[in-house]
Amino acid sequence: MPDIKLPDGKKIPFSKTIDGFEIAKKISKSLAKDACIMSVNGKLRDLSFSIDKDVQIKIITTKDKEGLETIRHDTAHILAMAVQELFSETQVTIGPVIEDGFYYDFSSKESFTDENLTQIENKMNAEKSVFVGIYCDGELMISFIKRLTCCHQVMITKLITQRIHLNT
């Protein structure tokens, strides 16, 4: 079963398939509490990713650049979910992580008011979502997004999967 090699070279043997949550707990309770993602053989994975063979891992927290980017990315999704639930006619377009946070562009017939922004913030604060990474090819991703009727997201995904670069 898997031997987990840590960044300091230490190996931790496990007798069964494990995930990042279990590895973080084995290392320390405080790390398990602060962990948000992990690197498995150099690839970022969520903590629920199953490991059944020898790998090198690094547990990543919000103190790490990748961890902070993940929190910002997930928060952008929570923002989009809140807007879609409150304003179902609004189309989600793009919402990247940027150096100091994130933003989201929406396509809507009307602008958001200050009252709308308060509603969105309250909805986001009430959200109790768990995000799990889904690893798939571009065609499967496009098919999934089409079912959600996110036309802007379909176009963006097609561009990414075809490696087309836009000049802005």
Image (cartoon, grey):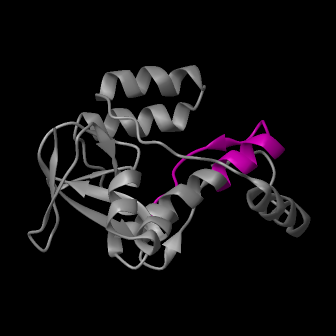
Q: Quadrant of the N terminus?
A: top left
- Determine the residue located farthest toward the right in the rendered image: 115
Q: Is 142 situated above or below 55?
A: above
Residue 68: % across, % down:
43, 71
Q: Is 150 situated above or below 62?
A: above
> Which residue is drawn at the image coordinates 44% and 20% (left, top)?
143
Residue 15: % across, % down:
23, 41
Q: Quadrant of residue 66?
A: bottom left
Q: Is 160 situated above or below 101?
A: above
> Which residue is drawn at the image coordinates 34% and 67% (left, top)?
60
Check if residue 81 falls in the magenta segment: yes
How many discs mark residues in the rendered view? 0
> Which residue is drawn at the image coordinates 31% and 58% (left, top)?
38
Q: Which residues are magenta?
A: 79-97
In this rendered view, identify the residue nearer to me: 83 or 15.
Answer: 15
- Determine the residue located farthest toward the front in the rendered image: 15
- Determine the residue located farthest toward the left in the rendered image: 9
Check if residue 84 falls in the magenta segment: yes
Q: Is residue 128 left or right of residue 130?
A: right
Residue 103: % across, % down:
56, 64
In this rendered view, identify the residue nearer to me: 14 or 110.
Answer: 14
Q: Is residue 91 left or right of residue 48?
A: right
Q: Quadrant of the C terminus?
A: bottom left
Q: Is residue 37 left or right of residue 57?
A: right
Q: Is residue 87 visible?
A: no
In this rendered view, identify the residue nearer to me: 11 or 68.
Answer: 11
Q: Is residue 41 visible?
A: yes
> Which residue is drawn at the image coordinates 50% and 64% (left, top)?
71
